[in-house]
Image (cartoon, rainbow, N blue to C red):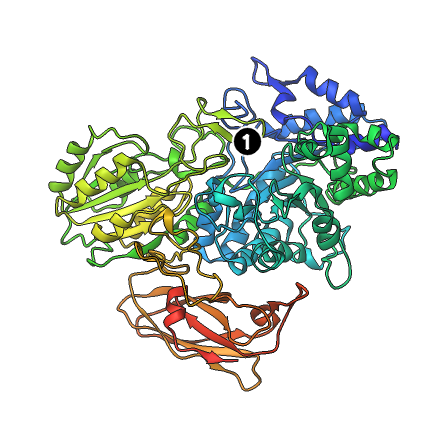
């Protein structure tokens, strides 16, 4: 390969939606921009977002490729690339798959924070497999999937992309993601083994520490010591690598002054290194959008920025100019051509594993849309978390409730259930809470509706109508929350993050909050409806844990559904009406206010921690979640060999139900200052009324290892308490056993 061809393989400069235009007859034609890009490097290494559709790209159903047209578009572009490549090297089509394929007609799944609330890796694995099959059936190859960010500050707008605040939960779900998208046993395969035609290699993002940026501000610095990085922010990445992930994406943030895209010790040392401290990763490392060009701030120009990133371990850029000048960087001696060759080899290896050289146009059959809807709804159903029901109003008793008022800015819409990174939906897609309750409630049940207010702003004009509806009903269902829905009036940064929010968007990339309260009118609506005396069930649809202590105090019952996807309204209505019981558990701690932050459960153990003016404890703890029955946990028992822990769990209620048994460790004597609690295992258990079952956990290195003074994970000398309960708060109150 010539130097020019090699450099071309490492570039992903174009936005995919600029590569084509739709003709009046419905077909597609290639743009001059694509011709210029392929001529520049005699081919094309990778193309980002050929199928992407959203407000930023401007692609919708009138201009983009739906499910039927996507394969033909991919075929058209790939044929052009092969014709322009002297060596016949196909392009790698890279697509966003944050919670389902981000393309027209792609199945939208609940966001990662909702997936975290399911505590169900097996269900998520099946949903991830479906998303991979959709990607490949549309002509895409490589899936960009958020998985590695740990939610340590819920003011961050991308909290919805995190599985939660805990590294163990995130690690288990990251493994499920890799298995689902790439195929079972991906971690045990040879590095060069091919991917099945309905499976897709994943790029796990973001590596590393982006969930701990200062002030919850996007792309800010992360003030992380090495131990915090290894204990909290690297376990999910390590689990993904061990599961066989094909690629990772370097994060925007810097760690101890070194941007991740220029962090050789992180990428070449820890990630790719061999021996005791290295993970031996052989896959691809991609930069986040325009992250390489940002390095010019410290190198002086974009040529040296590209050289720094390549030398530090980046293989593939994203929209950057810096990587387009790598030939000049080689000629100037800024980077050795052998380093360039190694990166090219990793890109080409991935293309071979995908079979693109043998079958550049091979596209499998599209999976059933009905199967996608079923999986999305199942995830939404499993994510709905009952936080309290002190008045015992749930499930709704049709003998007592004949009139239901469905109120709130989220009550009759699906647009705000979807989360960020979502393609435009066809009219009629999805089910709102109002529509689902109207459809599922008994025929004699009267359903009234009033919006009450908007998600943002202080307009109170709709509240009197909502109050009247609530006062005339036996039960009010008040659906509040936030939104990550981008609209054409949203202004965007060059990397697609929201810059100036002029819609109802209150969450998502670039939408960070200083406060965690809902819009002023929503709080006024909550106060007014609960003041009527009508029992009120508050449902929060949100991409972060908002601070709504008034709901905890005044609502008869409180649930959170996160962003549950298009059919989330159906899942919520089923639970409210008792067609199914809630099984979700909090993947994050719910704060009382932003002034408390941070409130994550696994903080360092200390005798201090109270405030004079506010309770320091979260409103609801990590792992908390109720259902329509009750469970009792026995005292855990350590096996005689010390390698297992047993605990009896009993359903003490009158209904069948599911609990998530959670095992925490609490180090007592260690070489480093310990954390109060650390989740190390969990298992979901379904029990009939009165049924008792013994749950057994292994107690091996996975459950007992800690990060030592050399930043290695191993079982350290000293005693450890084992605590088993249904939440982190419950674990603190549980009777421990010593291991």
Residue sitting at the far top: 24
| Residue placed under numbered mark 1 in the picture | 67
Quarter of the view holding residue 516? top left
Picture layout, residue 33 above or below residue 193: above
Q: Position of residue 355 (x, y in %)?
A: 75, 41
Given residues 736 and 56, the one toward you in this image is: 736
Residue 653 rendering spot, x and y as whole percentages: 27, 69
Quadrant (top left, top right, bottom left, bottom right) of the N terminus: top right
At horizontal 68% and vertical 54% (from top left) the residue drawn is 244
- Of residues 501 and 123, the one nearer the viewer is 501
Drawn side of residue 7 relative to residue 223, left or right = right
Residue 54's place in the image compared with 148, above or below, is above
Tally of marks:
1
Image location (x, y in percent) of residue 214: 51, 45
Q: Residue at x 85, y 27 (%)?
A: 86
Outermost residue toward the front? Answer: 612
Residue at 12% x, 41% y: name it.
Answer: 471
Q: Residue furthest bottom?
A: 640
Position of residue 535 measured from the top left corner of the image (x, y, whole percent)? 17, 50
Residue 44 visible in the picture = no
Mark 1 residue crowding within 10 angstroms, few (<14) / some (14–19) / many (20+) = some
Q: Helix, strand or loop at disc 1?
A: loop
Task: Please tell me whether residue 123 is drawn above or below residue 462 in the rendered image.
Answer: below
Residue 66 visible at all: yes
Q: Residue 202 occupies which quadrant of the picture?
A: top right
Q: Quadrant of residue 415?
A: top left
Left or right: where 159 falls relative to 236: left
Left or right: 433, with 164 as reference point: left
């Amino acid at each position: 390969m010539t130097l020019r061809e090699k450099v071309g393989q490492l570039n992903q400069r174009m936005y995919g939606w600029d590569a084509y235009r739709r003709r009046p007859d419905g077909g597609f034609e290639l743009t001059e921009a694509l011709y210029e890009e392929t001529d520049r490097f005699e081919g094309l290494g990778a193309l980002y977002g050929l199928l992407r559709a959203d407000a930023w790209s401007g692609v919708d159903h009138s201009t983009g490729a739906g499910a039927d047209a996507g394969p033909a578009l991919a075929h058209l572009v790939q044929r052009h690339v092969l014709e322009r490549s002297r060596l016949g090297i196909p392009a790698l089509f890279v697509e966003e798959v944050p919670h389902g394929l981000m393309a027209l007609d792609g199945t939208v799944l609940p966001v990662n924070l909702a997936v975290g609330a399911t505590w169900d890796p097996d269900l998520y694995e099946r949903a991830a497999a479906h998303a991979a099959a959709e990607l490949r059936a549309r002509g895409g190859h490589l899936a960009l999937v958020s998985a590695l960010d740990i939610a340590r500050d819920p003011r961050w707008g991308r909290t919805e992309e995190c599985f939660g605040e805990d590294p163990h939960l995130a690690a288990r779900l990251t493994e499920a993601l890799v298995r689902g998208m790439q195929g079972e046993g991906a971690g045990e395969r040879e590095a060069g083994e091919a991917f099945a035609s309905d499976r897709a290699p994943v790029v796990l993002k973001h590596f590393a520490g982006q969930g701990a940026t200062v002030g919850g501000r996007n792309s800010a610095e992360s003030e992380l010591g090495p131990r915090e990085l290894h204990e909290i922010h690297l376990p999910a990445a390590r689990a993904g690598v061990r599961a066989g992930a094909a690629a990772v994406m370097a994060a925007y943030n810097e760690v101890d002054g070194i941007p991740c895209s220029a962090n050789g010790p992180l990428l070449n040392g820890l990630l790719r290194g061999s021996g005791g401290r290295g993970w031996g990763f052989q896959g691809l490392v991609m930069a986040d959008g325009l992250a390489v060009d940002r390095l010019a701030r410290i190198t002086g120009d974009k040529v040296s920025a590209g050289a720094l990133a390549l030398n530090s371990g980046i293989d593939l850029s994203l929209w950057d100019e810096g990587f387009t000048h790598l030939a000049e960087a080689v000629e100037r001696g800024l980077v050795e051509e052998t380093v360039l060759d190694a990166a090219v080899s990793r890109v080409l290896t991935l293309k071979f594993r995908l079979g693109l050289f043998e079958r550049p146009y091979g596209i499998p059959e599209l999976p059933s849309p009905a199967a996608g809807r079923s999986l999305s709804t199942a995830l939404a159903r499993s994510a709905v978390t009952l936080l309290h029901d002190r008045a015992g109003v749930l499930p709704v008793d049709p003998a007592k409730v004949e009139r239901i008022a469905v109120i709130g800015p989220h009550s009759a819409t699906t647009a705000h259930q979807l989360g960020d990174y979502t393609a435009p939906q066809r009219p009629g897609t999805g089910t709102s809470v109002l529509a689902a309750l109207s459809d599922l409630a008994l025929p004699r049940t009267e359903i009234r509706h009033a919006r009450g207010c908007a998600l943002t702003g202080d307009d109170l004009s709709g509240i009197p109508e909502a109050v009247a509806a609530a006062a005339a009903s036996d039960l009010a269902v008040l659906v509040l929350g936030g939104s990550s829905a981008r609209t054409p009036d949203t202004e965007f940064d060059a990397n697609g993050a929201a810059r100036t929010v002029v819609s109802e968007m209150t969450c998502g990339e670039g939408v960070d909050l200083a406060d965690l309260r809902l819009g002023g009118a929503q709080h006024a609506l909550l106060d007014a409806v609960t003041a009527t005396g009508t029992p009120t069930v508050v449902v929060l649809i949100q991409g972060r844990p908002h601070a709504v202590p008034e709901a905890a105090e005044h609502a008869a019952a409180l649930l959170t559904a996160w962003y549950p996807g298009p059919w989330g309204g159906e899942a919520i209505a089923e639970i409210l009406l008792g067609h199914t019981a809630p099984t979700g558990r909090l993947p994050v701690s719910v704060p009382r206010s932003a002034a408390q932050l941070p409130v994550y459960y696994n903080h360092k153990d200390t005798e201090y921690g109270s405030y004079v003016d506010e309770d320091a404890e979260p409103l609801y703890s990590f792992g908390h979640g109720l259902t329509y029955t009750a469970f009792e946990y026995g005292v855990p028992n350590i096996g005689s060999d010390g390698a297992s822990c047993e605990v009896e769990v009993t359903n003490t209620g009158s209904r069948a139900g599911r609990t998530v048994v959670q095992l925490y460790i609490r180090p007592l004597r260690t070489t480093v200052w310990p954390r109060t609690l650390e989740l190390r295992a969990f298992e979901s258990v379904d029990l009939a009324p009165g049924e008792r079952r013994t749950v057994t956990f292994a107690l091996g290195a996975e459950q007992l290892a800690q990060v030592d003074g050399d930043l290695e994970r191993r079982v350290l000398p000293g005693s450890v308490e084992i605590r088993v309960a249904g939440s982190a708060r419950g674990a603190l109150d549980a009777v421990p056993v010593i291991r």
